[in-house]
Image: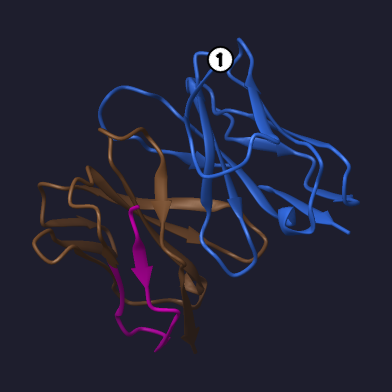
Chain colours: A brown, B blue
């Protein structure tokens, strides 16, 4: 089946940029998503990208998609302590139902 | 516009019992999906309901069942609870349109099975 992989942990200093990486295996993915989860909370949709795009920018967030390598990244500019959370990448294949397949999450720690 | 709500927030059950979790979808949404998130892992898709019918199912046994009501709210029922069913259960609502599916999640129900 489909698989989505992420590194477990990332630590950055406040004000630096953070880059969270994700790889996936489903070459028929239609959309790819980034969600944020704070402790004890549900998932907050941050942004998503259509599979025929290679970049999307939304304020401090930049998503890069390399479809050939099946690699997705999320760059957070000027990272703040409030950005500390777990970030999940997910993919959906609209031709195979509307289920999101998630990675295991990357814990981002922002140090003051 | 209200967001996705879930009840209860926390629940403790014992093995073999049955549980019902509830979800109210976001206004204007017609599709509800349920996910199970074990501690330290990403969410796993359980099933999705659209127009009151199951519209896709993940790798979960039949003791996980659900309902969707005419107002698009939904229930997740789990029979014969096992210890491994302890997890955060997340409900997501969306508007099925054939294009991008933005699934918006509720805060979850934390189920502990003893």
Q: Nearer the viewer, residue B31 or A24?
A: A24
Percent from the top left, x then y, of residue B2? 59, 30
Give the residue at mark 1.
B52
- Residue drawn 35% across the image and 32% down it: A97
A59 sits left or right of A81 in the view: left
Q: Is residue B46 visible?
A: yes
Percent from the top left, x then y, of residue A49? 22, 49
Q: Is residue B72 above or below residue B23?
A: above
Q: Is residue B107 visible?
A: no
- Pointer 1 indicates a residue of which chain? B
Q: Is residue A73 above or below residue A3?
A: below
B88 sits left or right of A78 in the view: right
Residue interval drawn in magenta = A1-22
Q: Quadrant of the C terminus of chain B?
A: bottom right
Q: Quadrant of the N terminus of chain B?
A: top right
- Residue drawn 70% across the image and 36% down it: B63
A53 sits left or right of A72 in the view: left
Mark 1, Cα crowd under 10 Å, few <14 / some 14-19 / many 20+, is some
Q: Residue furthest front?
A: B61
Give the image quarter of residue A38: bottom right
Q: Is residue A96 above or below residue A9?
A: above
């Amino acid at each position: 089946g489909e698989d989505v992989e992420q590194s477990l942990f990332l630590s950055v200093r406040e004000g630096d940029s953070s880059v969270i990486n994700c790889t996936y295996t489903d070459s028929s993915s239609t959309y790819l998503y980034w969600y944020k989860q704070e402790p004890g909370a549900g998932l907050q949709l941050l942004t998503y990208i259509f599979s025929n795009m290679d970049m999307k920018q939304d304020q401090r967030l930049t998503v890069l998609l390399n479809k050939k390598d099946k690699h997705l990244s999320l760059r957070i500019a000027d990272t703040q302590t409030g950005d500390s959370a777990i970030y999940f990448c997910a993919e959906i294949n609209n031709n195979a139902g509307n289920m999101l397949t998630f990675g295991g999450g990357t814990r981002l720690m922002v140090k003051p | 516009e209200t967001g996705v709500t879930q009840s209860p927030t926390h629940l403790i059950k014992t093995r073999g019992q049955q549980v019902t979790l509830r979800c109210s979808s976001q206004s204007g949404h017609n599709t509800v999906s349920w996910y199970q998130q074990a501690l330290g892992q990403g969410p796993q898709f359980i099933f999705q309901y659209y127009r009151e019918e199951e519209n896709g199912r993940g790798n979960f046994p039949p003791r996980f069942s659900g309902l969707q009501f005419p107002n698009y709210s939904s229930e997740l029922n789990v029979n014969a609870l096992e210890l491994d069913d302890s997890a955060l259960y997340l409900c997501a609502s969306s508007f099925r349109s054939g294009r991008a599916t933005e699934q918006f999640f509720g805060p979850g129900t934390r189920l502990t099975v003893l």
